[in-house]
Amino acid sequence: MIRIFRLSVYAFIILMGCQTVESENTKTTLFADSVELKIREFQDSRNTPAIISYLNNENARYRLQAARALASLQDSSAVEMLEVLLNDQDSSVRKAAAFSLGMTRDTIAVAPILRALKEEQIPVVRRELLEALGRVIDQPRLILLQQQEASSMPEKEGLAWGLYRAGRRNVFDQFSIEIALSLLNPQNSYRTRLGASNFLIRTRDVDNCAFQDQIRGLSAGEKAAAVRMNLVRSLGSCDKPETIEYLKKTALGDQDYRVRVNAVSALERSAALANDASLLVALLNDTQVNVAIQTAEAIDRSDNIQFNAEMQSLATEHPNQRVRGSLLSGLVKTDNEKWLPVVMEKYGAETDPYAKAYLLTAAAAGNNATQFLAEHIFSDEETVVNSAAMNGFIVSGTRQDILATAAVQPVILRALYSNDIVKTFQALTVVNDNYETYESLLDADELNKLVEENEDEFLVYNVQKLLDRLNGIESEEFAYENKQEIDWQGLQQLSENPKAVIHTTKGDIFLDLFPEDAPGSVINFINLARSGYYNGIRFHRVVPNFVIQAGCDRGDGWGGGTYAIRTEISGRQYEAGTVGMASAGKDTESTQWFITHFPTHHLDDDYTVFAKVTDGMEVVHQIEVGDAINSIEIFNSSEL
């Protein structure tokens, strides 16, 4: 799984001819080549015409770089020229063109990809074409993907991933399911089986339960944990007794905790957790905390859990604060009068800000907690506590339908003018949803003050939008203006194979950085690390069997820089231990990043990959919300 990455080294042929790129060993330092640097700058500025002008360059390396650059732009105006590259005499250029055609996500790319598949002979290029076809194919032409010849291992891989990419857009039929199940044959490669299993869990309307006996058998014999966890998860909502028993056995006994987490998730969707208290207690006591967290949160989401005495005891005594919070939330829902006072009492004795936040969320699950929550919205406690109180206040108020009442209005208006991103955003939503009630109460001077004083572009835009509504003006569409330029000089000073070590309170996590694939994201991360920005920052988000996330200076997920950098899509995929940039949409990345627990390929086409864990995955699996980053060190390859 570990990939050795060498900064600024390519092995491409210089002259066009019948030879492929792999036939030469000419090495060029990427960021010292003025032409390649110019292509990168055009990519960052989203200048499609300028990049297209390099697609017919006589230098194969520049054609390759331009084709790759277009993947991030996802601009269908490049389809015609990318099709020309599908006939390029250089196989790596053809492969890059195929990837970028798929990334346009436009059905106009279907025809050129199909034409290329008729002529292409090299299996690895055919693999890329098949996956690209899955990204752009529509339902009427799906059969054209399904009938593609796939005899070699790369081609089978491409077909599996093509079906998955189509399924992500809900483009599938019964034949797709049958092909995917056939590709799960143990004799096929891991990558083929992984793609096919992803199809089963990421295709929204697929009926896996019609094939549950076959899937159970495949899962029981599957050796790769990443494939097994997908197969287990695909059995969610299936209610056959044999399937339920298999999922229970897997949840309790699979050697990989991530498979156990997925079994709990499947059991929750099958509604098979609620009536088995002994199973719930065993799962809550699992030695891997993420299994306990997944179980507790499933309990909290259920409407018919019967809490026995042991489960009630765990709600106050479990060693993990997040598990306690979720169990208390479930208990508050079942008996508000008994358990809300318990939550308030526990809150008074608690000192950890994240434990307090979980308790506030638990309080919000019941009635009669709005006053308690309001007291902590504007307190001098840590930001994460204030944010949890505000979120809980809105959740509780929405459920009770009281957010427009006279008793609540002063809290909403105070939050609106607070100039705190969480309070103001939440209040904006309430005001806009209940505009007729709040219109006469709004203070235009306070709103103008927010616009003038806040540095967050999106918050300012939304406040201005409310002002425009108040004044009867139609607002313009939002567009980020504060884009950070890439520090090319800093990148050129890096050695090959730059690395990072994240020193956390749970241990060290070692990374290989990928400046060739994501130069803007890598140098942004490096500069922030060297400035000390990440020192003391906590992991504010941990989703069991998904990601750990950090980089928020507020600790509640709403913080970060007042600038944005570009999304950089390179074709690298989200395997276990992949490090990606968090975002709120394309080209909105800033300071937050995440590390994956296991392959999460639904992120591949939308989130920048800029690093990979090479050592310390055991630490990643132990990280909990509230764990801190002590510091991040950046090293050249020779220094580690």
Image (cartoon, helix red, strand yellow):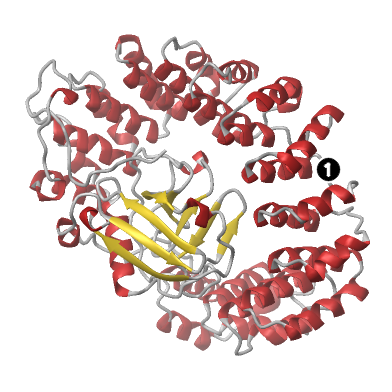
Q: Position of residue 62 (x, y in %)?
A: 15, 36
Q: Quadrant of residue 621?
A: bottom right
| Residue 350, placed above or below residue 435 | below
Residue 507 seen: yes
Residue 468, image x, y percentages: 50, 72
Please tell me which residue lies in front, 286 or 126.
Answer: 286
- Residue at position x 86%, y 54% from top? 303
Residue at point 45% right, 54% down? 616
Of the 4 image quadrants, the one containing the C terminus is: bottom left
Q: Is residue 160 left or right of residue 278?
A: left
Which residue is nearer to you in this view: 527 or 315? Answer: 315
Residue 623, x across and y down, in percent: 55, 61
| Residue drawn at point x = 74 percent, y = 57 percent | 297
Q: Is residue 477 visible?
A: no
At which x and y percent is residue 492? Answer: 15, 56
Q: Which residue is mark 1?
A: 271
Q: Amino acid at mark 1?
A: Ala
Quadrant containing the N terminus is top left
Q: Is residue 172 above or below residue 411?
A: above
Q: Nearer the viewer, residue 205 or 401?
A: 205
Instruction: Using the image, determine if residue 9 lies above or below residue 393.
Output: above
Please, is residue 1 above or below residue 81 in the view?
Answer: below
- The secondary element bearing badge 1 is classed as loop
Residue 153: which quarter of the image? top left
Counting other residues with Cα less than 10 Å from the Cα at mark 1, is it few (<14), some (14-19), or many (20 or more)? some
| Near-viewer residue (263 or 388) | 263
Q: In the picture provided, is 56 more to the left or to the right than 281?
A: left
